[in-house]
Image (spheres, rainbow, N blue to C red):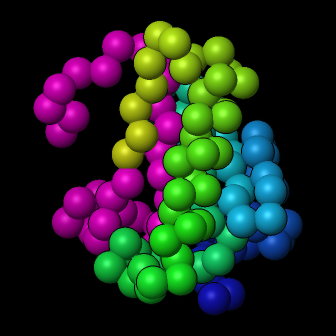
């Protein structure tokens, strides 16, 4: 999908401040952070929304959570706490249609989130 912003970052066509990468997952700092730590974690495979997940995508979604755990530890926020957010479709706030997880930390998080 050539018009996907996150695929362009994945492919190196657009620079990204990469904080984690393996064979299945890429994570980079958000360009418009909403917290002192705001990292986007994506599967390298393009999947537009949670509604587009297929049976074979279950493992890669688990890898997103494993990456989040590792990144939170490396950033020193795992003990104080962090929030993971995934939006599905525009009505929920999804603006880039490539599944992604926001890792937010470094400030108190309120509830409900919005």
Residue 104 position in % (x across, y down): 47, 31
Q: Residue at x 33, y 58 (%)?
A: 87
Q: What is the quadrant of residue 67 in the picture? A: top right
User: Foreground: 97 or 50?
Assistant: 50
Q: How many labels were placed on the picture?
A: 0
Residue 30 sits above or below residue 101 on the image: above
Residue 57 placement (x, y as % from top left) = 52, 77
The residue depicted at 68 percent of the width and 49 percent of the height is 27
Residue 54 figure quarter: bottom left
Residue name at image x 51 percent, y 63 percent: 61
Residue 88 locus on image (x, y percent): 31, 66
| Quarter of the figure that contains the C terminus | top left
Q: Residue at x 49, y 71 (%)?
A: 58
Q: What residue occupies the far bottom of the structure in this picture? A: 1
Report x, y in % for residue 41. Answer: 59, 51
The answer to whether residue 36 is visible is no
Residue projecting furthest to the right: 12
- Residue 89 vs residue 23: left or right? left
Which contiguous range is marked in magenta? 86-114
As for residue 37 lying within the magenta part, the answer is no
Pick the quarter of the image with the N terminus: bottom right
Q: Is residue 71 in sight in this rendering? A: yes
Classify residue 79 as left or right of residue 12: left
| Most foreground residue, 31 or 45 | 45
On screen, residue 53 above or below 110: below
In reply to whether residue 97 is colored magenta, the answer given is yes
Compared with 37, 55 (above or below) is below
18 to 107, vertically: above or below: below
Q: Majority secondary structure of the magenta segment? A: loop
């Amino acid at each position: 999908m050539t018009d996907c912003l996150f695929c362009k970052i994945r492919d190196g066509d657009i620079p990204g401040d990469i904080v984690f990468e393996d064979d299945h997952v890429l994570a980079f700092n958000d360009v418009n952070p909403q917290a002192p730590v705001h990292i986007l974690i994506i599967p390298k495979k393009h999947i537009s929304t949670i509604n587009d997940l297929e049976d074979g995508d279950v493992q890669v979604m688990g890898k997103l959570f494993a990456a989040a755990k590792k990144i939170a530890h490396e950033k020193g926020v795992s003990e104080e706490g962090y929030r993971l957010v995934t939006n599905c479709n525009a009505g929920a706030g999804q603006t880039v249609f490539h599944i992604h997880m926001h890792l937010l930390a470094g400030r108190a998080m309120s509830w409900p989130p919005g």
